[in-house]
Amino acid sequence: SAGTISVDAETGVLTMSGTANVTATGSSVRLRSQGDITVGNVTATNVSIDSDSGSIINAAGTTKNITAANLRLQASGSIGASARHFTTNIDFITGLASNGSIYVTEDNGVTVQDVAVTVTDFNSNAGTTDVTDVAQSDLTTGVNGNIVLVATLGDITLNDGTATNAGKAISANGSGRILIDASAGGVTANADIVSGAGHITIKADDDIILTAGVDVQTA
């Protein structure tokens, strides 16, 4: 089988230059740290980025943060920033920012749904250990975090995931605000879009479809 890449700063931060590249063609990449993860350019089929107590940051001078089919993002802080979105060319995404916001701009179209990623660690005894970031669903924030998902050229599809927030595809905590923007395509919501008390904006160049039973809700 194809080789995987695991990069784990167990008690520190993980910092890539904007011109640094991590590539696992046709396979999987996992970047994990205790603190912030600053991402250059990562290319694989499956990518997981997990910051236990920090944020996921778009490094200055990058070409594209993530080029992949499946992307799983998890941070204690934020994913991207309002002034510098996390940039992707992907098919499927899930993101969790427990104490921050999510700002993602996708080149084409993107679907929010479950993503799990497994890599294989090579050990000092020449053995191997599989490391799995289990299935995560939806785009979710805590502590009044905003959610911004922009698709530059394609459609946005929001599906109900099985792992978190059953029935919801987009869930912003408290006063967290939501923007779903398909700049040159359409939006199809097959699951709820919910904020505790924040503004919700859904924009599309083409059609917007809320399928049977879908709620768009704030207080």
Image (spheres, rainbow, N blue to C red):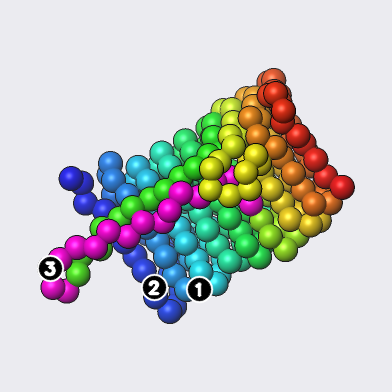
**Image: magenta residue range:** 124-140
Q: Position of residue 128 (x, y in %)?
A: 19, 63
Of mark 2 and mark 1, the one earlier in the sequence is 2
Q: Secondary structure at mark 3?
A: loop
Q: Position of residue 156 (x, y in %)?
A: 60, 31
Disc 2 designates what residue? 9
Disc 3 designates what residue? 126
Does residue 55 sit above or below 171 in this rendering?
below
Q: Amino acid at mark 3?
A: Ala
Does residue 200 sit above or below 4 in this rendering?
above
Q: Residues within 10 Å of mark 2 (few under 14, many from 20)?
A: some
Locate residue 69 relative to residue 202 in the image: left or right.
left
Q: Position of residue 60 (x, y in %)?
A: 52, 60
Cα distance between the residues tagged 3 and 1: 28 Å
Picture disc at residue 148:
none
Picture disc at residue 35:
1
Can residue 151 be seen? no
